[in-house]
Image (cartoon, grey):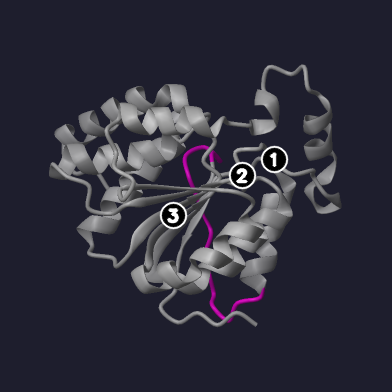
Amino acid sequence: MPTSVRDEELLHRVCREVAPYTMVPQAPLLFTLESALQSIEVGLKGSIVECGTWKGGCSFGMLLAQRYKHGKIIKPVWMFDSFQGLPPAGERDGPSAKAYQRDVDSPYYYDNCTAALGDVLTAIKHFRFSEEECRVVPGWFSDTLPRRTTALEREGIALLRVDADWYDPVRFVLDTLLPHTTADARVILDDYYFWEGCARATHDFLASSDQAYRLRTIGEFAGAWFEKKASELIC
């Protein structure tokens, strides 16, 4: 967490620079940036993984925070996103999710959270991130995550941010990636207080574990997070 005025100024600078590329409000965005730096400060093994990136703002922010704080990027960021928008909401996502996808004229629809891959790649060049530092993996999680588990197991995951909205993708990410997440790493759940499916998937996943996980709130109910336990056994 920031311990100086300089750190706070640094993170607010990053928030301003990535604002055009994210829908995440400032409080959870700051927490995400702080968590990225914290993973380095405490020496956690692994890379950073974000599942559900939209235009890439959070991922870019976690990389910029490292660059400004340490003069280089220490932990690369994996960016997993379909770049085709959200899949259809299911029954476990509740009526609000289905209403959101029907209301295509809403100013908050954002084309069903679709982001053009070409625009994201252009932004990566703008920020001067290398392919090794910013690892973009387009496609549905069910296709892309299993193909990367060998690499992620080898590297470890020092911070996992889950911004997948609906029940099925949130549960799939947790089931697939928690076993490869480093002990004491933070797991951020962007939509826990916003979408019913995310909350249900989180609770179902945690109930399947033998660990007594504690969910913690980000800001004024702007998201939730927990820490990976040292011993993980998924039933």
* Secondary structure category for the residue under label 3: strand
The amino acid sitting under disc 2 is: Ser
> Circle 1 sits on which residue?
86
Quarter of the image for residue 2 reads top left
The residue positioned 48% from the left and 44% from the top of the image is 218
Marks 2 and 3, Cα distance to the nearest angstrom?
15 Å
Query: What secondary structure characterizes most of the magenta part?
Result: loop
Marks 1,2: beta carbons within 8 A: yes
> Circle 3 sits on which residue?
49
The residue positioned 44% from the left and 21% from the top of the image is 20
> Circle 2 sits on which residue?
82
Mark 2: few/some/many CA within 10 Å (<14, 14-19, 20+): many
In the rendered image, residue 207, in percent from the top left (x then y), is placed at: 66, 72
* Residue 76 shown left or right of residue 167 in the figure: left
Please name which of the two marks, 1 or 2, marks the residue nearer to the observer. 2
In the rendered image, residue 65, in percent from the top left (x then y), is placed at: 26, 39
Residue 202 makes an appearance in the image: no
Q: Which residues are magenta?
A: 208-222
Question: Toward the viewer: 127 or 37?
Answer: 127
